[in-house]
């Protein structure tokens, strides 16, 4: 389990206390992390009920900032946390790929050249589609009732629902919604994979000349972006 913000805060406090007291830092930092670990076990992630956060429907042209604002409240949610973290990690990776690719293009080509347009256009489109996909995930997250999902899941596990109960269908619908978030995330994962391939091909091309493999990667990025365009 990696360090989170709370871990860092605990560690910093330990260091600040250790200096004036003349105490060795590492043991105190270790104790602070142990306390944090115990705190986590005593206070597990909560499941948020629907409506606990302000609902802000994201349009197709939503910005990355608006998507981040929508998903951040769910990072610690017991059910939606992995989906929220996936969106934030996707943005971080996409921006890193985008900067890397444009760094190569700036070194190799003029911005007024056709070659620049050939490579830069699909990258920008891919980035837009990543944001679009993430907005679809965020909209589904905001409408999801994690607390109710967990409650109903416990009752089902205990054998409290018969097949003809409406709760059974509702649980199926909620699970389908979670699955849909996973499928949309997979679309983003594929786009990120192709951007990584493009960056690798451009790096090779910069040192060894043009390669047809680069065209194949660009075509795959365009195809994935078009698939996203018609996604509902």
Image: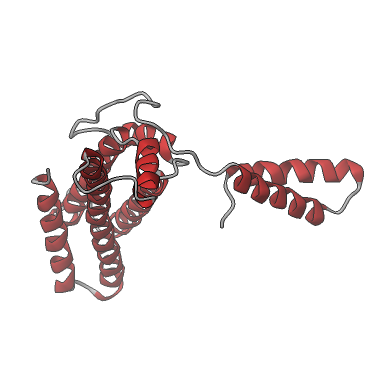
| Residue at the bottom extreme of this rendering | 208
| Residue at the right extreme of this rendering | 22
Q: Position of residue 221 (x, y in %)?
A: 17, 58
Residue 79 drawn above or below residue 215: above
Q: Report the residue at 64% width, 45% height from top.
A: 8
Residue 130 visible in the displayed image:
no
Q: Quadrant of residue 135?
A: top left
Quadrant of the rendering where the N terminus is positioned: bottom right
Q: Position of residue 90 (x, y in %)?
A: 34, 50
Q: Position of residue 30 (x, y in %)?
A: 75, 55
Q: Report the residue at 24% width, 62% height from top.
A: 194
Q: Report the residue at 12% width, 56% height from top.
A: 222
Q: How many numbered badges does the structure rendering display?
A: 0
Considering depth in this image, is 64 or 139 the residue closer to the camera? 139
189 left or right of 211? right
Residue 210 visible in the displayed image:
yes
Considering depth in this image, is 87 or 43 the residue closer to the camera? 43
Q: Quadrant of residue 200?
A: bottom left
Q: Report the residue at 29% width, 26% height from top.
A: 56
For the rendered model, the colour scheme is: secondary structure
Quadrant of the rendering where the C terminus is positioned: top left
Considering depth in this image, is 118 or 127 the residue closer to the camera? 127
């Amino acid at each position: 389990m990696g360090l989170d913000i709370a871990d860092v805060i605990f560690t910093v406090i330990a260091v600040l206390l250790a200096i004036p007291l003349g105490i060795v830092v590492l043991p105190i930092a270790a104790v602070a992390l142990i306390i944090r670990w115990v705190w986590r076990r005593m206070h597990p992630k909560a499941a948020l009920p629907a409506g606990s956060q302000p609902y802000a429907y994201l349009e197709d042209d939503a910005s990355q900032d608006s998507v981040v604002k929508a998903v951040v409240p769910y990072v610690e949610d017991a059910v939606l946390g992995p989906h929220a973290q996936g969106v934030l990690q996707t943005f971080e990776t996409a921006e890193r790929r985008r900067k890397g690719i444009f760094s190569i293009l700036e070194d190799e080509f003029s911005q007024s050249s056709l070659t620049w347009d050939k490579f830069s256009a699909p990258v920008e489109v891919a980035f837009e589609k990543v944001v679009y996909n993430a907005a679809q995930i965020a909209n589904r997250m905001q409408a999801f009732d994690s607390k109710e999902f967990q409650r109903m899941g416990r009752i089902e596990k205990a054998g409290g629902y018969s097949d003809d109960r409406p709760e059974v269908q509702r649980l199926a619908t909620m699970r389908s919604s979670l699955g849909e978030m996973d499928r949309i995330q997979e679309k983003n994962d594929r786009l990120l994979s192709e951007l990584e391939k493009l960056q690798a091909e451009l790096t090779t091309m910069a040192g060894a000349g043009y390669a047809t493999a680069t065209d194949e990667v660009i075509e795959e990025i365009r195809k994935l972006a078009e698939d996203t365009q018609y996604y509902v």
